[in-house]
Amino acid sequence: MNDIALQNKLLAKFKPFLESTSTRWYIVLVILVAIFAWGISGLVHQITGGHIVTGMRDNVVWGVYIVNFIFFMGLSYAGALVSGVLHLLNSEWRKPIIRMAELVTVISLMIGPFFIFFCIGRLDRLHYLFIHPRIQSPISWDVIGISTDLIGCFIYLYLSFIEDFAILRDQQSINLPRWRQKVYKFLALGYTGTPTQKKIIHTSRTIMSAMIIAIAIIVYSVLAWIFGVTLQPGWDSTIFGPYFVIAAIFSGSGLMIILMWIFRRIYGLEEFITKKHFVNMGVLLLIVAAFYGYFTFCDYLTKWYGSVKINAELINKLFSEFNWMFIFANYIGIIIPIVIVGIPQFRTIRNITIGAVIAVVALWVNRYIIVIPTLETPFLPIQDSRVDWLNYAPTWVEWSLTAAGIAIFIILFKLVSKFLPIISFSEMSHADYRQLKILE
Amino acid sequence: MSGKENKKNSSRRKFLKTGITAGISAAAGLTVGGTLAGKAVAGSGRKVKALTTDGKVIEMDEAMVEGSAAESRHVPMTIGRKESMEGLPNRKFVMVVDLAKCKNARACVDACQQGHYLPKDHEWIRVYYMKDSPRTAPYWFPRPCFHCDSPMCVSVCPVGATYKRTDGIVLVDTHRCIGCKFCMTGCPYSARVFHWKEPDVEQPDVPYSPETNVPAVEGTVGKCVWCADNLRKNKLPRCVSACPMGVIYFGDMVEDSVSNGTETVRLSKLLEDRAGYRFKEELGTNPGVYYLPPSNRSFSVESGFEGHEEEIRQRYEKHVKKYNSKK
Amino acid sequence: MKIKTYFFLWVLMFSAGMLAAQEAAVEESPGDEEPIEPVMELTYLKDSDGNINLRSSMVNYVDRMPVPLTGLEIDFYAGEDSLVALGSVPTDEEGLAVLVLEGNPDVPLSADGSVRYFAEYMGTDNIYPAEYEVYVTDVNLEMNLEMVDSVGTVSLRAYILVDGEEVPVADEDVYVYIKRMFNDLPIGEDFLDENGEFVTEVPDDIPGDAEGNIEIIARFNDHYLFGTVEKRQTVPWGVPTQYDFAVPQRTLWTQIAPLWMIITLSILLIGVWSHYLYVIVQLFRLRRLARKEEPGSLV
């Protein structure tokens, strides 16, 4: 029942990439590894010198590391949304991009927690989180949630790979070394496309996609509640749970568009990833941007309107010291994607991608202005004579580790795309299951 | 050949014998000399300053000092995590700070830092310059840890490194703390500090106790512990005894009595007569520290800037300016 | 010959070791070059059992902070012209040396009926000697506690023995306290009347221990004539207290979490992970199926 012709076409398309590696690939890899090594040197400097080498001090105790953590966790929504929701809705157009989405999810879920580790003062006691947990603490909820999410997404990713592994195992057109063929064979679990097997995979994927959506929402809300349950001005907001979820969906869809554009260019996938995909994702981006803007406005309007002194101080700080960041994150980051996708003349692939880039960066800045200004305006004023105690300024250690996080993200993508095609063959060549009465 | 070997062997044996004897006698001498000079071979582990007969100040193991309190003390020498989680029976500690007397002498800060071997920038008790609104008068505000009855910091700790015990004291076990700093964002009063690097004050070589947080651990959180180690000996916390103005009162809510070292009063009477209140009561943390309003002060607030290093004055300058500009 | 060699060697190494240790110990210490001038104080306390406590404290002020001096031998004497040696006590870790004399010691009286107590520290090359004297008249303080019309009443009487006769002490200030954990709570003070008597009432709302016991202290507080003289007695006149740490066991900040949290978490975890397990089981089933069926091809 599979469209074998389409499948072969895809195989032919990916053959050169799976078979051999270009020099350019290696050059980019070396650059990325160098950036990663710079980050590791920063980490070593931090471990030996203590956290004093970062910009964090007694009031702003959470800095760029936590911002990165939330940011990377937010990117994982690409998978939950595109893959999970669209799978349940059974949209046809999702097919070329679901693999990218699922990969983004797993990779960003793997990288995100590392940024928490960098923020922790005693890395040698990390296991206490598992052997001495206190379940009243939002961090314990986070540990449980992220572990569950990571494993769930991994299972889901694997499920989508099985048929592709089988195809790669069976195909003759691409020359692959023996060890890779063996690995494909093992991972394919002997899948041969019989109806029972298909049913098993389909049911499992449906279950997992439902789980993934639920888990993703729970995990991201828990992350929001790490801030929301405290008494700090700016964080003590009831809207934080949904706000963070919306922001995550926003960043996830933005990243999806960027990845679509990159892979389309590298692999020449114009045929499979068309303008329609960009427009659909762009519309999604628009809708979520509107929601995100709405939530942001709700949050800040109610803070600004009320006369509570500490909120007024926070708003004042946002519009003076953090003015440009605030405008970029909450005005530019929302309006530009909406304008680009909303006005048909602007709706080109390139423009939509630019809008997505702006959206993703704006969301990083948004996390920054959620975390840091609050910590700089505690209830008891910071009365200190040292500049680095009064205002937070990230140091090279923190920037290097941020760069290393982005570098490892790209590296992992490169490695996986070497091993597996970035478009799911099997998915593309499936007919719609609903048409097949087998599964009733 | 064998003769030569024998000679070699015997001379080697001789050398070894001589060497070993020399070594053993040297070691014995060192031990005896060390003991005589006061170095503990096996002792209680706590060191006290003592004067030798020729007037040199040395550090001696406490147990070696004759007639020392250690010999007669009944409390265990080390309070570990388990013991520190039980509060003193039938006690509920409370502190009252009289804002009408505080003039930023900072003796409390110095005594606390000295007693707990804290680095200069770790202030477990911190004195703020507060001016609540444009037309109210400024005052000095000493803020120790409030040891809240509904402590936010304890709720958010993921590993149980901080806990509240029955006598009201909230402690930090820096051998359990992983340094996530969630408690620092949880505390609305900024009462906690973090060891961002190895403490640059030399830590004494004593077994660790959560009641003192000595020796300090890098990468962990610290805060005022209401000198729980003093309380076991019925002694007042260090800041209370050190304050030259008698600003801080400390006592037990159960026996309704607080003392600032010279004056002992009934807590209920003090709070009633002087209109005691708690800071930011509306946050619902139920602090264990009460404040007496700064009324009828006989000194000017500006006198609190004098007699300190320039750095201390600079801290407050920005806020003095800010408060004054709000007229 | 051999033995001699060994013996000398032994002595040599032993002494070297000792010297090294002593040097090291001495070098470790922040040796003071100038002699220390200690600050000495002597206080007299006649406690509730009638025993006399002579307390001498030795501190040295370094940067305005008092450093207690430990291990110094303080000699106590009584008398003016002829000194009676009472004993020697070394100072403890807090710089205090306490000498306890059993009640009514045989000490020489001065002309006005007082006793001169004298503490001395001989001094060394590095510490200046110090001495302190106090003149104390021995006074007898009696305390009588009884409930009069269901009000706790403290009756005090003080007298001096002059040639075996009781002479009441008049017009001297005496204080009454309740013992508390850190210091003593004052409940009354006044001057003794011409009979050397003083009566005061104990408030009925003083918290006591679990049985309601409170310790009442009558005291001459560092009196210029009498020193510090106290009389203590425990009576069940206080309000019984039982402090139940009246906080429920299950809250956000206690060891055990609220029940609803545990239940919610369990439901969520079990719900999600059971689905995971189901899927994993299905994957294994897939493998088993494949082994049974014929190997097909997807290409």
Image (tube, rainbow, N blue to C red):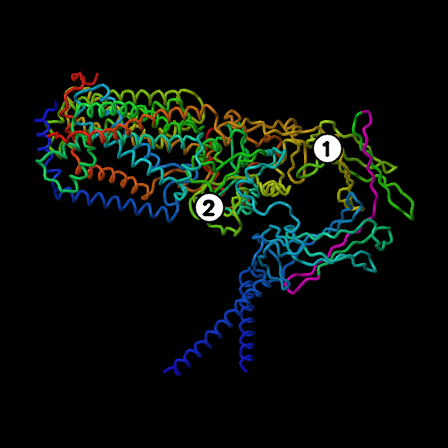
Q: Is residue A147 magenta?
A: no
**What element does badge 2 sit on?**
loop
Residue B70 drawn at (x, y percent) = 63, 50
The residue that label 2 is drawn on is B217
The residue that label 1 is drawn on is C213
Residue at 32% in and 23% down: A214
- Magenta residues span C122-149
Q: Is residue A289 above or below residue A190?
A: above
Discs 2 and 1 carry the same chain letter? no
Residue C123 drawn at (x, y percent) = 68, 62
C180 vs C287, left or right, is: right
**Disc 1 marks which amino acid?**
Asn
Foreground: C151 or A352?
C151
**From the viewer's perspective, is the residue at label 2 or at label 1 nearer?**
1
Q: Chain of mark 1?
A: C
**What element does badge 1 sit on?**
loop
Foreground: B138 or A233?
A233
Q: Is residue C128 magenta?
A: yes
**Contact check, label 2 and label 1, Cβ < 8 Å:** no
Residue B56 drawn at (x, y percent) = 60, 61
Q: Residues within 10 Å of mark 2 (few under 14, many from 20)?
A: many
C103 vs A370, left or right, is: right
B174 vs A15, left or right, is: right
Return the mark for residue A269.
none
How many labels, in total? 2
Specify the quadrant of the image occupied by residue A247.
top left
Foreground: B143 or B251?
B251
